[in-house]
Amino acid sequence: MRIKFAHIHEQGIDFVVFDADATSRLESDRGKLLSDLMIRARASGLKVDKAALAFMENGRLTYYGTPDLVRFLANNFLPRWTHHIDV
């Protein structure tokens, strides 16, 4: 499966936003998925300080991840995917 993501440098922070959600939609599974994707992004040579998942839930774009990054994304981010990872 190919997962799209954005790698962004903003306010001195390198972060990634993955176009993905856990199949179960459970918070624990979302945390594991986010951790796994961060490891893969770092292994590909990207600097990652913070990360989040972006997905549609109840008809709205929703973010899961580092709380301060989620707040920033909710107010400032429209998905524009720059990379992908094959998993």
Image (cartoon, grey):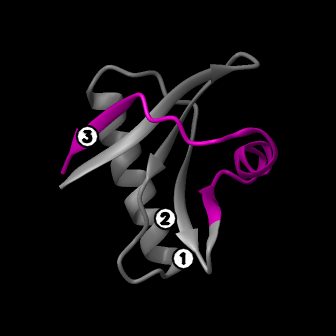
Q: Which of marks 3 and 1 precedes in the sequence?
A: 1
- Few, some or many C-alpha atoms within 10 Å of disc 2 (few <14, some 14-19, many ≥20)? some
Amino acid at circle 3: Ile
Q: Residue at x 52, y 63 (%)?
A: 55
Q: Secondary structure at mark 3?
A: strand
* Placement of 17 over or under 36, stated as above or below: above
* Placement of 18 over or under 22, stated as above or below: above
Q: Is residue 65 magenta?
A: yes
Quickly name the residue at label 1.
27
Q: Secondary structure at mark 1?
A: helix
Quickly name the residue at label 2.
31
**Rendering coords of residue 60 (x, y %):** 65, 69
72 vs 85, left or right, is right
Label 1 with label 2: CB-CB less than 8 Å: yes
In what quadrant of the picture does the N terminus appear?
bottom left
Residue situated in front as seen by the camera: 77 or 50: 77
Inter-mark Cα distance, 1 to 3: 22 Å
38 vs 16, left or right, is left
* Placement of 11 over or under 81, stated as above or below: above
**Rendering coords of residue 20 (x, y %):** 41, 59
* Placement of 3 over or under 31, stated as above or below: above
**Rendering coords of residue 61 (x, y %):** 63, 62
Inter-mark Cα distance, 1 to 2: 6 Å
Quickly name the residue at label 3.
85
67 vs 20, left or right, is right
**Rendering coords of residue 44 (x, y %):** 26, 26
Label 3 with label 2: CB-CB less than 8 Å: no
What is the magenta range? 61-87
